[in-house]
Amino acid sequence: MMIIDLFADSKIIAKEDKLLTEETKRVISELNKAYLLFNEVTDPYETESIIYRMKELETHYSYLIKEAKLGKVHNPCFIGGINI
């Protein structure tokens, strides 16, 4: 894997890092909105729908973090989906 990284195009790597980071930020934002909405709704069907949406977003977030840990992100400042 190290040999591949030595010859990889840095522009492609930067683009992949940026896309993964942006997607993670989007998922975090959507998840925060779902949490807020969950606290406001009173209809049981809407509550159930939001619970499914939160689970979907949480699963997608876990996938993105897994991808980052597997070396898809080459930015050492990438922590929990957010560049610091």
Image (spheres, rainbow, N blue to C red):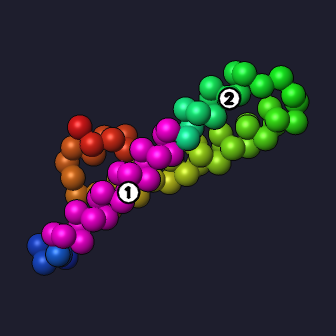
Residue 39 in sight in this render = yes
Looking at the rendered structure, the secondary structure element under dot 1 is helix
Q: Nearer the viewer, residue 82 or 79?
A: 82
Question: Alpha-carbon neighbours of circle 1 within 10 Å: few (<14), some, or many (≥20)?
Answer: many
Please, is residue 34 above or below residue 20 in the view? above
Residue beneath the point at 38% across and 57% down: 20
Percent position of residue 42, x then y: 83, 23
Residue beneath the point at 48% across and 40% down: 28
Residue beneath the point at 27% across and 42% down: 83
Residue 40, picture quadrant = top right
Give, as a three-letter code, the residue at label 2: Leu
Percent position of residue 36, x then y: 62, 26
Query: Could you say which disc has been placed on residue 52 in the image?
Result: none
Q: Which residues are magenta?
A: 10-29
Residue beneath the point at 68% across and 29% down: 37
- The residue carrying mark 1 is 20
Give, as a three-letter code, the residue at label 1: Leu
Residue 50, picture quadrant = top right
What is the distance, in whole Å, between disc 1 and disc 2 at their CAs? 26 Å
Residue 75 lies within the magenta run: no
- The residue carrying mark 2 is 37
